[in-house]
Amino acid sequence: MIERAAGAGPLRRLVVLRHAKSAWPLDVADHDRPLAPRGRRDAPAAGQALAEAGGLPDLALCSTAVRARRTWELAAAEWGTPPPVRYDRRLYAASPAGLLAVVHEVSAEVETLLLIGHNPGLEELILALADDGVDDTLERVRTKFPTSAIAVLSWYGTTWRALTPGAALLTSLTVPRGAKK
């Protein structure tokens, strides 16, 4: 459990969403790959899971890759009023350090941030930031952070720049799947 030190700031949550399952069409650049049929089913389920958890973000940061953008669009369509989104090319194929550098730029007014991107960077970021996890969440991330997975990291801080390796608690891990029609 994370402890709140005096003057540590508000409880902040970093919600990490791996893009939904993508297709592999021939002669399409990796950045331009679309979602596969399963991805088009799973992305709305991820949006529903976030809404049901009661923790919609104040801001979303999304990779510019087609599969990440479409995941965001389908997930956000499940919410009454989606938060603002910023598409950032730096999130595509980013290392954990690169991802954290983008997160550090977020305004202190944002208390819940949604980060939509790719593996292996997202998985490695979660493992670097989480000092501990609720139940078996850390072990599950170590085993696999599959497409459409949602990890929630919680920590206290006055700014996003204060988020450092080992500072957060992995409070939940969900892998929503949409029903086949």
Image (spheres, grey):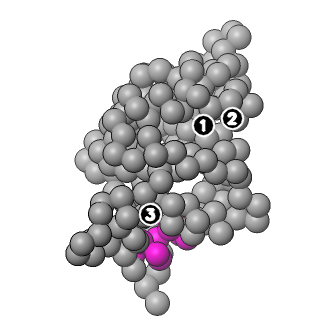
Cβ–Cβ under 8 Å for marks 1 and 3: no
Of residue 112 and residue 22, the one placed in the foreground of this image is: 22
Q: Position of residue 99 (x, y in %)?
A: 44, 35
The circle drawn on residue 66 is: 3
C-alpha separation, residue under disc 2 versus residue under disc 1: 6 Å
First of labels 1, 3 by sequence position: 1
Instruction: Judge depth for marks 1 and 3 and give the one in front.
Output: 3
Q: Amino acid at mark 1?
A: Arg
Identify the secondary structure beneath mark 2. Answer: loop
Q: Amino acid at mark 3?
A: Val
C-alpha separation, residue under disc 1 versus residue under disc 3: 25 Å
Of residue 114 and residue 13, the one placed in the foreground of this image is: 114
In-image side of 35 versus 154 (left or right): left
The answer to if 67 sits in the magenta stretch is: no
Specify start and end residues of the magenta stretch as a single range: 38-46
Residue shown at 46%/30% (left/top)?
100
